[in-house]
Structures are given as structure tokens and as C-alpha cells.
Amino acid sequence: MSPARAMVQDANGAAAAAKPLANSSKLPKEVSDCTYELIESVAQFLLDRVSIRPKIGIICGSGMDGTTGCLADALTDSTSFPYETIPYFPTPTVPGHMGRLVFGYLGDVPVMCMQGRFHYYEGYPLWKCAMPVRVMKLVGVTHLLASNAAGGLNDKYRVGDIMIIKDHINLLGFAGNNPLMGPNDERFGPRFPAINRAYDVNVRRMAKQVATEMDINNITHEGVYSVVGGPSFETIAEIRMLGALGVDAVGMSTVHEVITARHCGMTSFAFSLITNKSVTDYESYEEPNHEEVIDMGKQREPVLKEFITRLVKKIEDDRDE
């Protein structure tokens, strides 16, 4: 977007004028969006306009960030920034991704929530898809909680189940596409970050406790997630290959966000809502579609709200101990 003055709409409908970023127009496009200084400027843009200082950042996935009943609507004392009003932020083009960054309180815990994310298949490079995570880091966030909609490969999974991600297979990375490609800035993190413990074991333990407290153990699992590029859904041969590799669920997001968060030293947690069963039978006439993703997200909104709210509370209590 142009660095001209943008208008930010807060929760009460009041408007605040956004200041332009100094000298930003002089930076070449291919480098201006990835420098530490630019991302620091975006973070400062937000900090100048909110009093909340969140330590937990939440990314709402497909079907979980719509216009009604979504997690962001549960925040109190909130201030929202439509993505198009935030300098250098991309904008989502996918149905079910509203496109707002919301600061507020979930219960009594200050958080910032992405109501919609960005995908590689929309034409954005992976570092651009994950750029908001670096903004979160420079705002002061220490914990990233990401959700997504995914197709279930594991025969034990049913549509509507929740899968806590314990590990991932980064197929985009196998193809030489990683959000950390290009020059590395040590102010974000090391050149070669370790990703083998990307999904924090302590937060996963808390999530299982929440599932027990909510009496939803029967629909909660822990498994391996794989990211594919999209936007086309997978072929039967591709699904069978992923199943043979030990993948339990497949989707088109999250992995590059988690890699970026770990590079920044953030604690990461992610889960998938199983919105469809992946087709593995050549005789089947079923076809996955985005509408079922949106519909299942809406059906599970109350459960997911409570799940995330309780988990955020446990993380905050753990931090205070």
C-alpha cells in the first residue's frame, strides 16, 4: 500500500490518522518489505496506536475468522486494524479470511489476533506470508498460537476433530522454498535455526489438559501436519504418499509461520481443525471444497473459542509462576 496517511478504525468507530513511514518510498520493493528497520517501523506504527502490550499472538485459520462468532469478536477493550491500513501489510484474498489485526483482552490476558492470514498460493512469497509473525515479535509477543483448517489423513480422525500439531513435514521447504531464504539478519535470529522442537512440548501439555477439562478428549488428537502449496487440493496419489510418510493432516499454511516464529525465538503452538477427510479411494466421487472448510469452522467456533481462551489463560498463569 502507499505510505500515505492511512485511517485506522478502532473498536468504538473512532478514526486515527496513520503516520507515513519516513523515506519508505525510496527503498526498492524487493528489499523494503523484509528489512529489520521496516518491520520495526510497522511494529512501532501499531504500538503508537494501542495501549495494550500483548505477549501472546494468535493466528485464526480458515473458517475460524469470519465476520460473526469468531475469536477476535470475543476480545474486550479491543482495537482493530484492517490490514489495508497497516503500512506494508499484505491483504488476504481468500473467502473466510476477514483481514484484521485485533488487539484486546481474551479473558484478562492481553493478546493480538490475526483475523485472516496470507498464503503462498495467493502469490505472496513465503517471507511475506510470515512477515506478521516478525511484527508480533517486535511488538513484544513471546508466544505464537496458530490454527488452521486441514484435511484428515489419519483413519481415526473425523470431520470436526482437533489435532494438536506435534511436528510437521515442510514440503515447500523440500522444494527449496523457505521463509528464511535470503540474507539473514541476526537481530531476528540465527542463519541456521533448529526446528526439531518447533511445537513447544509444555504448551502442548497444557492443550491436552484443556481438552480434558472441556471433556473433548474424544475429538482431540496429536499428530503430524504437512504443508502443501495449493491452491488445488491434493491428488489421491499425493495423499497416499503423505500418509505413507506419517502425515496425519494436510493444509496450506502454518509451517512457514512457525518456522519464522522459532527463528525469532518465540514459543510456538499450533492445531488443526479437521474440516474434511482426504480422499484416498479412486472409486470415490467425493471432492474436497472450500465451502465445507468454512462450514465446519463455523460449527466448531464455540468449542475453539473456549479451547483457545483456556489455553491462553494457562500460558499466562505459567508465565507468572
Image (spheres, grey):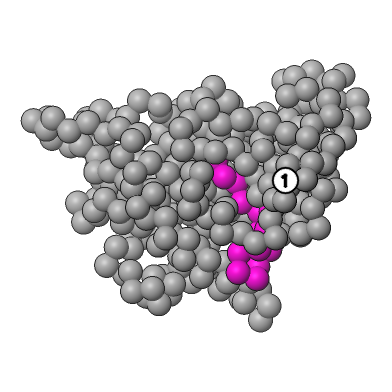
Q: Is residue 29 above or below residue 256?
A: above
x and y, in percent, of residue 190 in the image: 70, 45
Q: Quadrant of residue 140?
A: bottom right
Mark 1, other Cα within 10 Å: few <14 / some 14–19 / many ≥20: few
Segment tinted magenta in the rendering: 103-116
x and y, in percent, of residue 272 in the image: 40, 51
Query: Can I make out residue 65 in this image?
Result: yes
Q: Is residue 32 above or below residue 184?
A: above
Determine the main secondary structure of the stretch shown in magenta. strand
Rendered residue at 24%/43% (across/down): 277
- Tell which of 99 and 199 is nearer to you: 99
Give the labeled residue for mark 1: 13
Query: Can I make out residue 203 in this image?
Result: no
Rendered residue at 48%/26% (across/down): 121
Rendered residue at 79%/53% (across/down): 50
- Tell which of 108 and 262 is nearer to you: 108
| Relative horizontal placement of residue 111, taking residue 258 as reference (left or right) | right
